[in-house]
Amino acid sequence: MLQVIIFVVLTGLGFAIGWFANAALGKRSLATAKKKAESLISEAQAEIEGQKKEKLLEASEEIFQQKQELEDEYRDKKNELLKFETELANKDSNIDRKADLVSKKEKDLLLLEQELRTRENTLNIRQKNLEEAIEQANHKLEAISGLSREEAKNQLLDNLIEEAKNEAAHIVYKIKKEAEENAYSEAKNILLTSMEQIVSSHTIESTISTVSLPSDDMKGRIIGKEGRNIRAFEIVTGVDVIVDDTPQAVLLSAFDPYRRELAKVTMERLVSDGRIHPGRIEETYAKVVEDIDETFQEIGEQACHEIGIHGLHPDILKYLGKLKYRTSYGQNVLEHCKEVAELSGILAAQLGLDASLARRAGMLHKIGLVIEKANESDYSKVGHEFLKKYGEHPKVTNAVLSFGDHAEANSPIAIIIRIASDLSRKRPGAQRDVIENYVKRMRHLEDVADNFEGVKTAYAIQAGKEIRIIIDHTKADDAMSNKLANDITQRIRQEVENSNQSIKVHVLREFRSVDYA
């Protein structure tokens, strides 16, 4: 029992000691926390005071800067006002001076008006005295001549009119005679002066084009095995390929410059590529046809740039480029048009006319030759409608239309175009009738064959000794091919002058089937 009591007493005493110890420790922790809190508060207050001072300083600086800006703005406005006041003062001073000048001029005008009135009165008095003197003199003349005033006036007018008629007739006769004497020499001088300013080479076109080869070994590849490449090339292009002893070159022969140019470019591309076989020939030719159509406009632009013509529609330029591949009596038509344009401009300038308009009409006067469905008889009509469609100047369209005798010339420019064209065509060496007749005969041969049903294309080759005809296999069989060759032969005998020369009619019918795997 005593042990229990001692244990209880000790336990109570331990609790008391723990409580007092815990209370003491709590007070100490509280004191420490208070000190830490007071330290944090003082630091925060110090930081707040620092930030407050910084903000006050920034605000002061901003206020000072705004104050400076306001003062500068005030000073500028004040200077502007002072300047404006000075200008107003100067204007007032000028107005005062002008007012003084105006008042002075008004006084001078008043003095002049008074002087004029005085002179007018004096003149009126003199006029009156003069009229009285003339009246007295007229009375004396009437008394002396025995004629009234009206009778004398009429007689005098009749004498003056008759004298004027005689003098006018004499002057007109003199002018007419001088004009007749000088007209021929003046026209001759103008034409000679114009021709002297044109220096151009002969523009005769040949029927042969040369293609250079890298080596003579290429000739064998052009010919192909058993001649299949050269035959395919001639069928596709419609030209003769001449492979002879000419070193590193082959010749292409055709009467049509456009067809010959297509063949030349095709051959050059094949030689450059090195792959020559029938399929490649057809692909290359088709690509050349597509590409050369795109170059027509460039050719037209270059020609117009050389002559100094601007502002033509792109479609007009394209057809001008096609003239490069057209000939007339062996003369290149584009070169002829350029020459006519230059001559027309010079002639117009000599006569005081619009030289640029004359050059424009000269360049375009034969554009109808290369427009579809045009022929030698109505190409000027076709060209007139074509140019009118694109809004060309009326004097230009009339010059083109009247050039073919389809309308009257309504301006001197149309006459100038005719003169310039004759000068270009008729100068020595400009044309060759033999070439023109040859080209017409070749075209006639092709036209005869083209008129038969089933014919796709026809090429006159070998200088007219052979006509090669490609027919549509869907419209004619082998039996009909023989009949077609016979019919074309009979028609050629009837319509074409062959000068005792035999013409080989070669009809080709080919069927192809193409598929892709």
Image (spheres, rainbow, N blue to C red):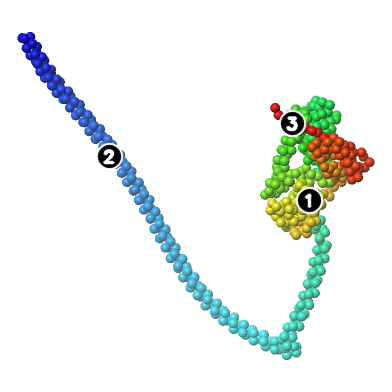
Residue plotted at (78% across, 58% down): 407
Residue 120 horizontal side relative to residue 507, left or right: left
The residue beneath circle 1 is 379
Q: Nearer the viewer, residue 454 or 336?
A: 454
The residue beneath circle 2 is 56
Residue 99 horizontal side relative to residue 167, left or right: left
Q: Is residue 103 above or below residue 72?
A: below
Please state which amino acid type lies under the numbered disc 3. Answer: Val
Q: Position of residue 333 (x, y in %)?
A: 79, 46
Residue plotted at (40% across, 57% down): 84
- Residue 337 makes an appearance in the image: no
Residue plotted at (85% across, 30% down): 244
Identify the mark nearer the N-term, 3 or 2: 2
Q: Quadrant of residue 96?
A: bottom left
The quadrant of the image that shows the N terminus is top left
- Residue 18 makes an appearance in the image: yes
Q: Position of residue 266 (x, y in %)?
A: 76, 34
Q: Is residue 493 above or below residue 391?
A: above
Residue 300 horizontal side relative to residue 90, left or right: right
The residue beneath circle 3 is 514
- Give the CA distance from mark 1 to mark 2: 96 Å
How dense is the environment of label 2, judged by Cα within 10 Å: few (below 14), some, or many (20 and up)?
few
